[in-house]
Amino acid sequence: MHRSGTSCLTGIMQGLGVELGEVFTENLYNKRGNRENSRIVNLNDAVLNTNKSAWNRPVVVSKWTPEQAHERDSIIQELQGRIAAHWGFKDTRVLFTLPFWLEAIESPLFIGTFRHPHRVALSLRNRDQSPPEDGWELWRIYNERLLELVEQYGIALTDFDQPDELYLSDVLDKLIALGLDPALAARGGEFFDPDLRNQASSSVDGVSLPADVLSVYDELLNHHARS
């Protein structure tokens, strides 16, 4: 889900040697950038639009145009052509456009991240002026889809709300378990800046969340505890 530590996770991953191509390294709401490749984001938006959806009203895609497939293949070829042992990308939309990408990528590896739904909703409110209730519902839609993929692919998850040292250790351990170089762990860890975690100090005590949102959050916590 957006605003759930995806940029932080991807920056650490990049420090561990994953080639991302040309990504945003600074913007208004991510001081170190969201680490997204604009070609990939634009393509995912286009594929969602082909399926009559968008990032804030997503559906799992089932169709795409030949032109979109050609752009996808061009992106993959460009990333594979760079000198790096591993390449990858981050875009929250991929939760819903994954069938499109799996048509062209064999045996991908995944890692996911989540955080408390109310902290996500507060961060969305700051960025988009959206009501918390809308943020909770969008959080539910994204994370229900994430849980589906967790079960299907055995995706490891990290909790962005963990204390600083536990969070960083958890991320590094799980990235190294995916095959990234442990010798680069210190460099990867340098990306993490606790002061840039939006809403980290926001209390979630006493927040009355819908039952279906709480149920998804409990499932995420349980999966993380087991992984």
Image (spheres, rainbow, N blue to C red):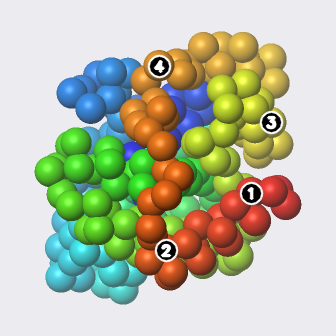
State the residue at coordinates (33%, 80%): 59
Circle 2 is placed at which residue position? Answer: 213
In the rendered image, residue 193, in percent from the top left (x then y), is placed at 52, 19
Mark yes or no: residue 87 visible. Answer: no
| View extreme (left): residue | 129
* Above or below for 203 versus 111: above
- The nearer-to-camera label among 3 and 2 is 2
- The nearer-to-camera label among 4 and 3 is 4
Kind of residue indicated by mark 3: Asp
- Mark 4: secondary structure: helix
State the residue at coordinates (36%, 61%): 93
Quadrant of the rendering where the C terminus is positioned: bottom right
Kind of residue indicated by mark 2: Val
Q: CA distance from mark 1 to mark 4?
A: 24 Å
Label whose residue precedes the other's in the sequence (1 or 4) = 4
Mark 4: few, some, or many residues within 10 Å (few <14, many ≥20)?
Answer: few
Kind of residue indicated by mark 4: Asp
Circle 1 is placed at which residue position? Answer: 224
Q: CA distance from mark 2 to mark 1?
A: 17 Å
- Residue 195's disc number: 4
Q: CA distance from mark 3 to mark 2?
A: 28 Å
- Residue 178's disc number: none
- Residue 173's disc number: 3
State the residue at coordinates (73%, 25%): 165
